[in-house]
Amino acid sequence: MESDPGFQAALSEARAGHEEGGVPIGACLVAADGTILGKGRNERMQKGSATLHGETAAFENAGRLSGKTVKGSTMYTTLSPCDMCTGACLLYNVTRVVIGENKTYLGGEAYLKQRGVEVIVLDNAECKSMMADFIKKNPAEWADVVPHTQE
């Protein structure tokens, strides 16, 4: 599954974000037929955005899609999705979420599963390494990204 074009696109987005000095999280939305609908990366730091996370950027870059187009789709993401991105996946009826890693941050996986979404965690070493590097270099920024985990 790590060689899947959707995951590779998400990983490429995470690498680009990492090179830009941003939070290295990438995502890719793929239709049931394998067509890449949209991809994006967390641009919270680069654009000063509160909502441009990897998954929401992928939805934004996919443009306005019909429910028929998104039905049966997969969201590939390099890090477990936060509550906002979990909600976006549910709102747009994504049926499978493939996650690069969930050791750095555990998001809404249980809720996705509860709502019938298939969740696959790859435990990808490169995803973990990029996040560890970002957190080491930007501890205050990471604390701001996930403030509820600091309580």
Image (cartoon, rainbow, N blue to C red):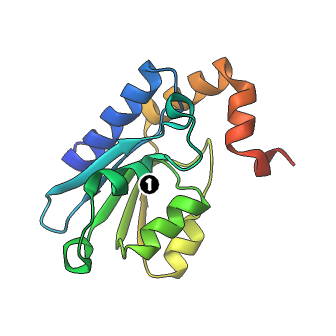
Residue behind mark 1: 56
Q: Where residue 65 appears, x then y in whole percent?
A: 24, 69
Above or below for 130 versus 19: below
Q: Residue 122: in sight, yes or no?
A: no
Q: Where residue 8 appears, x then y in whole percent?
A: 26, 40
Along the line of sight, the residue nearer the viewer: 105 or 46: 46
Say which residue appears at 46% left-offset and 45% top-offset: 123
Q: Where residue 104 appears, x then y in whole percent?
A: 62, 41
Q: Where residue 68 appears, x then y in whole percent?
A: 20, 80
Say which residue appears at 42% left-offset and 19% top-offset: 19
Residue lying at the far right in this picture: please name it.
Answer: 151
Above or below for 9 versus 30: above
Compared across the picture, whether 123 is left or right of 7 comes to right
Compared across the picture, whether 106 is left or right of 63 comes to right
- The picture quadrant where one finds residue 12 is top left
Above or below for 122 versus 24: below
Q: Residues within 10 Å of mark 1 (few under 14, many from 20)?
A: many
Say which residue appears at 55% left-offset and 41% top-offset: 49
Report how many numbered discs are placed on residues in the image.
1
Q: Residue 75: in sight, yes or no?
A: yes
> Dot 1: what SS?
helix
Amino acid on which the number 1 mark rests in the picture: Thr
